Amino acid sequence: MSGRVFIVQRPAYKDRSTGEWVLKYDLSPAQEHGELIDIMPVGPSFWDINSIVAQAERILEDYDPNYDHILAMGDPVAIAAVSLIAGKSGGVSVLKWDKKAQRYQPFFVQV
């Protein structure tokens, strides 16, 4: 089974001249840990927690902490919801950027 990287929400800003969302970071280095999968769309924060939870539960339904990872970026409420949902599987593997190594390192969190 090959791993996946679930991105909570890609940080972006709205270009004033075009009105389009522009991604702030190149997340391609995270592909070393698997296919990149977005949970929440790029854009403004969400205020309806029920829609965040429903979308995250659907996307994370077969999350496996032995192979899959969470990239905790974006809306803090969405990050918390995703972490709780993924954690139901027995723990969460979170990717953290290592400036020195210039790559993402996985950290397993279990409570």
Image: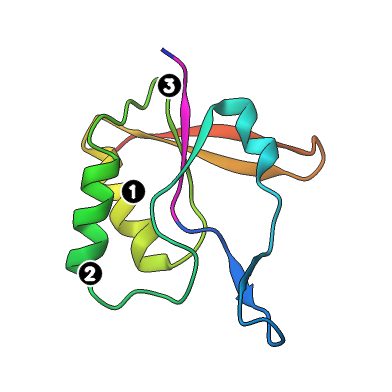
Image quadrant where residue 31 sits: top right
Residue displayed at 32% across by 33% down: 91
Q: Quadrant of the N terminus?
A: top left
Spatial separation of the CA atoms under disc 2 and disc 1? 14 Å
Of the two numbered discs 2 and 1 in the rendering, the one whose residue sits closer to the viewer: 2
Q: Position of residue 84 (x, y in %)?
A: 26, 49
For label 3, the SS is: loop
- Mark 2 surroundings within 10 Å by alpha-carbon count, few (fewer than 14), some (14 through 19), many (20 or more): few
Numbered tag placed on residue 49 in the rendering: 2
Choose between 13 and 84: the one closer to the eye: 13
Q: Any magenta on residue 27?
A: no
Q: Which residues are magenta?
A: 2-8
At horizontal 71% and vertical 50% (from top left) the residue drawn is 26
Q: Is residue 74 above or below residue 59?
A: below
Residues tagged 3 and 2 counted as in contact (Cβ below 8 A): no
**Residue 42, placed above or below residue 106:** below
User: Cα distance, mark 3 to mark 2?
Assistant: 27 Å
Is tag 3's residue or tag 2's residue first in the polypeptide sequence? 2
Counting residues from the N terminus, which is met first, the one under dot 3 or under dot 1? Answer: 3
Q: Amino acid at mark 1?
A: Ser
Please name the residue shown 31% across and 31% down the image: 63
Please tell me which residue is depicted at 49% across the width and 64% down the height of the picture: 42
Q: Is residue 47 above or below residue 17?
A: above
- What secondary structure is found at the residue carrying circle 2? helix
What's the image's color scheme? rainbow
Specify the amino acid type for callout 3.
Tyr
Quadrant holding the C terminus:
top left
Q: Which mark is residue 67?
A: 3
Tell me the SS state at disc 1: helix
Q: Is residue 36 left or right of residue 53?
A: right
The percent coordinates of residue 56 (x first, y second) are 28, 50
Residue with the mark numbered 1? 83
